[in-house]
Image (spheres, rainbow, N blue to C red):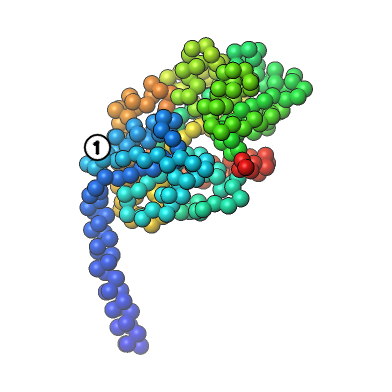
Amino acid sequence: MKRRMFTAIASVAALLPAVACGIARAADWPERPIRWIVPFGAGGANDLIARAAADAVGKRLGQPVIIENKPGAGAILGADYVARAKPDGYTWLVGAAGVVTNSMIQAKMPYQDSDLVPVGMIAVAPSVIVVNPNVPASNLKEFIAWAKTQSKGIDWSTAGSGSTPHFVAEMLREDGVNVNIIPFKSGSEGVTAVLTGTVPVTSEASIVVLPSVKAGKLKALATTYKRRITAYDQLPTAKEQGFANVEIGHWAGLFAPKGVPQPILDKMAKELEAAVRSPAFRDKVLPTGIEPEPGTTADFVAFITAERERLGRLAKKANMRADQ
């Protein structure tokens, strides 16, 4: 009995230096530049949000936060890179809706959802439903009424299966709209199809479509965000127009690879929230149509959990499958 007790005490004692070393490393973090991986190309909503936040967070941490774009496979390439990264607090993911939805529509995933740990929300580029100016509707109610008169249904361009525009279309399908999904390789291609009149309607991030809306090249019917867009507050939400189920945005949030020490996660979450609440960050993103979404890690976890349940139901009902 005494021998077993001595062995147990010795085992714990042997672990103490490693634990102490880990605590020390967390206390000293960060000692060098940090990388935020953006799983999309430069210039899109996720990239712009990431760069604005990285600048603010880097100043607070006293180390540069460097953006690396790793686009591909519907954001899976960049997410997988982070999921496999060394969990030392120097590699993070600026994830988007695909972090939630990819596992719903992909037959195989290179990583598990649990391999990416939610840290905090950054901001949302609200989704805006837009139509070609020739469509006889100036708001969502008029559009849905008109769409229901089209015997062959309404073509709706998306950025591919499981994209945010696809989910908006499925939400409207629940309101009785007969939608024909027309997938494109990107959101910009889907918007171009509406601009040219090839497809009458789509939804896309505020920063993508608002310039064309303001120029009269597109008509904005509603934002599917939970509140009006600060930079374009004359546009009512879908909920205001009687369609409370039509709610989704092009959000960006920070994730860590599983295994990052909790003190590092806590410190990053604290500085991220403070940065997103700062006037400098708000002044940088609000004019573009992006809405800051500061909050705690618990807030972000609750959001992710709710989105998995809500969007999972829609994906299953629509039989969404990854584009081949």
Question: Observer-nearest residue: 263 or 195?
Answer: 195
Q: Position of residue 249 (x, y in %)?
A: 51, 32
Quadrant of the drawing holding the N terminus: bottom left
What residue lies at 27% left-to-right and 60% top-to-bottom? Answer: 22
Q: Residue 70: tell me if it is visible.
A: yes
Nearest to the observer: residue 99 or residue 267: 99
Q: How many marks?
A: 1
Residue 78, position as x, y percentages in the image: 44, 45
Who's the residue at 50% across and 21% down the image?
209
- At horizontal 64% and vertical 30% (from top left) the residue drawn is 182
Within 10 Å of the Cα at label 1, are there few (<14), some (14-19), or many (20+) other Cα atoms?
few
Closest to the observer, 17 or 93: 93
Q: Is residue 203 visible?
A: no
Residue 247 located left or right of residue 270: right
The secondary structure type at the circle numbered 1 is: helix
Q: Residue 178: image x %, image y %? A: 71, 28
| Percent position of residue 235, x then y | 51, 18
Which residue corresponds to the image point at 25% horizontal and 57% vertical from the top-left? 25
Judge whether 296 appears above or below 170 on screen.
below
Residue 29 vs 244, above or below: the answer is below
Inspect the image, locate mark 1, and give the three-letter code of the amino acid beneath it.
Lys
Q: Residue furthest right?
A: 151
Q: Which residue is mark 1?
A: 59
Q: Quadrant of residue 157?
A: top right
Give left or right: position of 259 versus 222.
Answer: left
Which image quarter holds the C terminus? top right
